[in-house]
């Protein structure tokens, strides 16, 4: 009979996280080439790693939600939760009215609408809104 000890489980978990992170880096390169160029391709693995850690601090446990959080970090900016221009996103994620995964999905869908209908908001030097 196979017995998995805690050390074995930790090793499997660490390997799975590393593979997920590597997959995210490649996916981001494919989906967001302009944003990756702006970040600097050599900085992308660091941005992905830090975004994954931040997502977990927000209690995002689901791979789908973590992936969406990483995408937001790449599309807007790695510190989008603390930046003045995107502070509304942090406020949205702090709302406890629904689960963290539901809030993340809603925010992710909003990102796609912004990318499609208001791409000027993603420009590096886009002005802040009047009340921002």
Image (cartoon, rainbow, N blue to C red):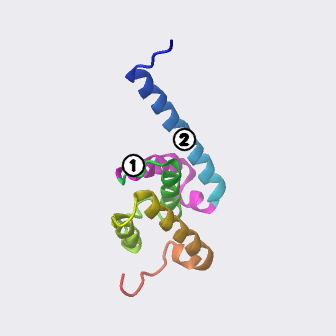
Q: Which sits earlier in the primary sequence, circle 2 or circle 1?
A: 2
Magenta includes 118?
A: no
Q: Secondary structure at mark 1?
A: helix
Q: Position of residue 132 (x, y in %)?
A: 36, 81
Number of numbered labels in the structure image: 2
The residue that disc 2 covers is: 20
Name the residue nearer the viewer: 52 or 43: 52
Q: Position of residue 59 (x, y in %)?
A: 37, 51
Tell me which residue sits at (52%, 77%) in the image: 121
Name the residue nearer the viewer: 53 or 92: 92
In the rendered image, the vertical position of residue 91 relative to residue 11, given as above or below: below
Please identify the quarter of the rendering in which residue 37 is found. bottom right
Magenta includes 39?
A: yes
The residue that disc 1 covers is: 56
Res. 80 mark: none
State whether the magenta stretch is mostly helix, strand or loop. helix
In the picture, measured across the screen, residue 12 lies left or right of residue 59, that is right
Q: What distance separates the C-alpha of mark 2 from that of mark 1?
A: 14 Å
Tell me which residue sits at (51%, 48%) in the image: 63
Q: Position of residue 20 (x, y in %)?
A: 54, 41
Tell me which residue sits at (57%, 47%) in the image: 25
Label 1 neighbour load within 10 Å: few <14, some 14-19, many 20+: some
- Magenta range is 34-57
Please identify the quarter of the rendering in which residue 83 is found. bottom left
């Amino acid at each position: 009979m196979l017995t998995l000890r805690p050390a074995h489980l930790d090793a499997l978990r660490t390997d799975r996280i590393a593979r997920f992170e590597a997959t995210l880096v490649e996916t981001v390169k494919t989906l967001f080439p302009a944003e990756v160029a702006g970040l600097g391709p050599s900085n992308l693995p660091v941005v992905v790693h830090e975004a994954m850690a931040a997502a977990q601090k927000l209690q995002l446990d689901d791979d789908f939600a973590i992936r969406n959080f990483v995408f937001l970090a790449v599309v807007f900016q790695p510190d989008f939760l603390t930046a003045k221009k995107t502070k509304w996103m942090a406020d949205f994620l702090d709302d406890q009215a629904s689960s963290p995964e539901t809030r993340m999905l809603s925010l992710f869908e909003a990102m796609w609408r912004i990318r499609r209908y208001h791409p000027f908001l993603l420009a590096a030097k886009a002005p802040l809104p009047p009340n921002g």
